[in-house]
Amino acid sequence: MKLIVGLTGGIGSGKTTVSDALQAHGASVVDTDRIAHAMTAPGGAAMDAIREIFGPRSMAADGSMDRAWMRETVFADPDAKRRLESILHPLIREASNRQVREATGLYVVLVVPLLIESGRWNERVHRVLVVDCPVATQVIRVQRRSQLPESQIRSIIAQQASREQRLAAASDVLFNDGSQHGLLAATRALHTQYLATRATANLDLAEQGI
């Protein structure tokens, strides 16, 4: 059975930098955010259901999901959030499970931003890798890449698990202090650790899916 590492962290923490580095070292990366993005692109597997449930306002001109409209809608309406999740989560679970089964890398990195929030992470992965950074740093990074207002970014952060909750669940932690060199060096060391874990650990685990 493959070693499965669940990679998580708050928005703007540096998950993509870490997953890209682990992939460069030979890991297979299964990224649930990327899966969700593909499913809400033009012609994506979720688009018919989204259009049916949320109506034409949910659609961008190119036929993809209008992400800005949907983001505002689900933040303002918990029921809308549940309806969107009821569409996306089963599709993401199926696709991520398939990608994990088909992975051929040295081990699998399963990137799940809401891994801790899912409540059953210990059934899905062998190790939990948390990319951690201060909330103020998260806000700055997300503002730089997305131009969202600070209030909206903090609202997103508030709906995610706290740093304390993620760290309590972590098997491994990479602290992102803003040094790209330092983060990549720590990631490389962790890769070596995972190779050793893969060779010696008992990897019995029911692959329950995300």
Image (spheres, helix red, strand yellow):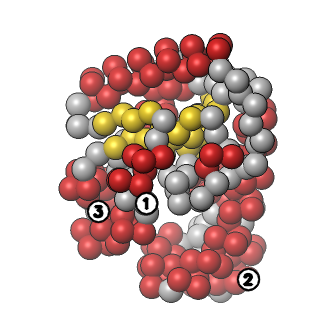
Question: Tag 1 or tag 3, which sits nearer the N-term?
Answer: 3
Q: Residue at x 77, y 52 (%)?
A: 94
Q: Is residue 26 visible?
A: no
Residue hosting label 3: 147
**Amino acid beneath label 3:** Gln
- Percent position (x, y) of residue 71? 47, 74
- The front one of 157 and 34 is 157
Residue hosting label 1: 161
State how many labels appear.
3
Residue hosting label 2: 52
**Amino acid beneath label 1:** Ala
Element carrying mark 1: loop
44 vs 190, left or right, is right
- Percent position (x, y) of residue 4? 64, 33
**Amino acid beneath label 2:** Glu
Cα distance between the residues tagged 1 and 2 = 31 Å
Q: Residue at x 61, y 67 (%)?
A: 64
Residue 79 picture quarter: bottom right
Cα distance between the residues tagged 3 and 1 = 23 Å
Mark 3 vs mark 1: give the one in front.
Answer: 1
